[in-house]
Image (tube, rainbow, N blue to C red):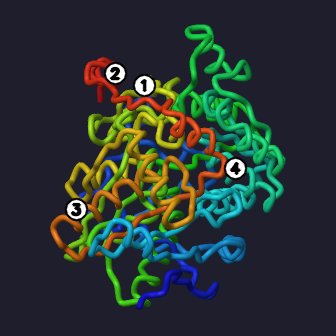
Amino acid sequence: MTDTKITLKESEIPTRWYNVQADMPEPLEPYLNPGTKEPVTPEDLQPIFPGALIEQEVSRDRWVTIPEEVRDIYKTWRPSPLYRAKNLEEELETPAKIFYKWEGVSPPGSHKPNTSVAQAYYNREAGIERLATETGAGQWGSALSYAGTHFDLDISVYMVKVSYEQKPYRRIMMETWGAEVTPSPSEKTQAGRKLLERDPDTTGSLGIAISEAVEDAATRDDTNYSLGSVLNHVALHQTVIGLEAKKQLDKVGEYPDVVYGNVGGGSNFAGIAFPFVNDRFDGEDVEIVCCEPTACPTLTKGLFRYDFGDTAMMTPLMPMYTLGHDFVPPAIHAGGLRYHGDSPLVSKLYHDGHLSAEAFYQNPVFEAAELFAHTEGHIVAPEAAHAVKGGIDQAKRCARTGEEKTILIGNSGHGHFDLAAYDEYHQGNLVDYEYPEELVKESMEKLPEV
């Protein structure tokens, strides 16, 4: 009988991150300078990123060594446990085996410190004193605030206004770690002032918050910008998740038939999925599924085009699935999934047929999350609940067909600061919103010509 909790020793924390770019059959298209439309150079990125992260962004080396100081901090919560969801299996009466990798054990409660600690380290090494960033649900802002305490960095967080209002405890968590938190859009930046002039009642978006954070970093010599998802180096740092999961499954003689991860910008998904994508390249028959909300259906309804990563068009143009850089999503509770674009690497792999995608309404997502809480005990974040929903649906299909599949779910964090969302679900107040095709088409017309 397989143990309920499969653990590794601290000595088994990966010593290297895995870079999927080394093995992709088709290389990623280059980022483009928004002014010249020519490929971005390292010099273009130097005003906001340290050299080591710029190098990781473009590297095609298969393995990148994790600095010992970063790995020592990882030991606070890593290796994270892999669970066999036996109670859930019994409840579903499924022949499938369900495993989930649980990232809720980190101090901020999610997968995000896997990259925030690394980014803070490289910025400290480059002599930077302050980092500016954005956050949607608050998980990334919390993670960077936590990392700042380890490397004596000041942290400025622009938090999407609707999340700032929905999740005050995330703000308090960031402030407890010493960060300055500003609801976005704000009067502090030119980008924020312009947007408030146009729409004083806006709920904000990640694209807007990114614009403010980039402007903040670009206008101060002591400050760099730090992004919690989307970029290649962020996906790289997160691969500790999947690398550990492979070791843990191997310990009990298992390998997944299907892997589920939630996708907003793509960092958690890349973390659980990319080490298994590598196996697909080597001929392994493993299905890998991106789970997203119908309210922000970037992969399932967006286009694979060059677009800006922010609303004010300050970032490089990136090849990605997008709903348009001026897209402002409805105020669903999965704040970390309310982003107009996706990681270029995730987008490229999906476009080339190495990944599949499913979109879910938020009421069924919370229904799945509550079933998970009743059976497995963990109250998961609304973002993570999308992957849980995908895994449960697969297990139900196995119950109908009799297939004995092994299912792996990337469970990105706890929902202890999302209880208001669970309350809204209990009260029957959540709306199952589907982003209309006509609004997608309208946004597509505003995409930059490349």
**Nearest to N terminus: mark 1 or mark 2:** 1
Q: Are marks 1 and 2 in contact (CB under 8 Å)?
A: yes
Tell me the quadrant of the picture where the N terminus can be found.
Answer: bottom left
Q: Residue at x 45, y 84 (%)?
A: 247
Calculate the distance from the C-alpha at mark 1 to the C-alpha at mark 2: 7 Å
Q: Residues within 10 Å of mark 1 (few under 14, many from 20)?
A: many
Foreground disc of the pair 4, 2? 4
Residue 115 appears anywhere in the view:
yes
Q: Is residue 146 left or right of residue 426?
A: right
**In the structure shown, which secondary structural element does the residue marked by tag 3 occupy?**
helix
Q: Which residue is mark 1?
A: 327
User: Hey, what amino acid is under mark 1?
Assistant: Phe
The kind of residue tagged 4 is: Ser
Sequence-earlier tag: 3 or 2: 3
Q: CA distance from mark 4 to mark 1?
A: 25 Å
Q: Is residue 311 left or right of residue 48?
A: left
> What type is the residue that disc 2 sits on?
Ser
Q: Which numbered tag is attached to residue 159?
A: none
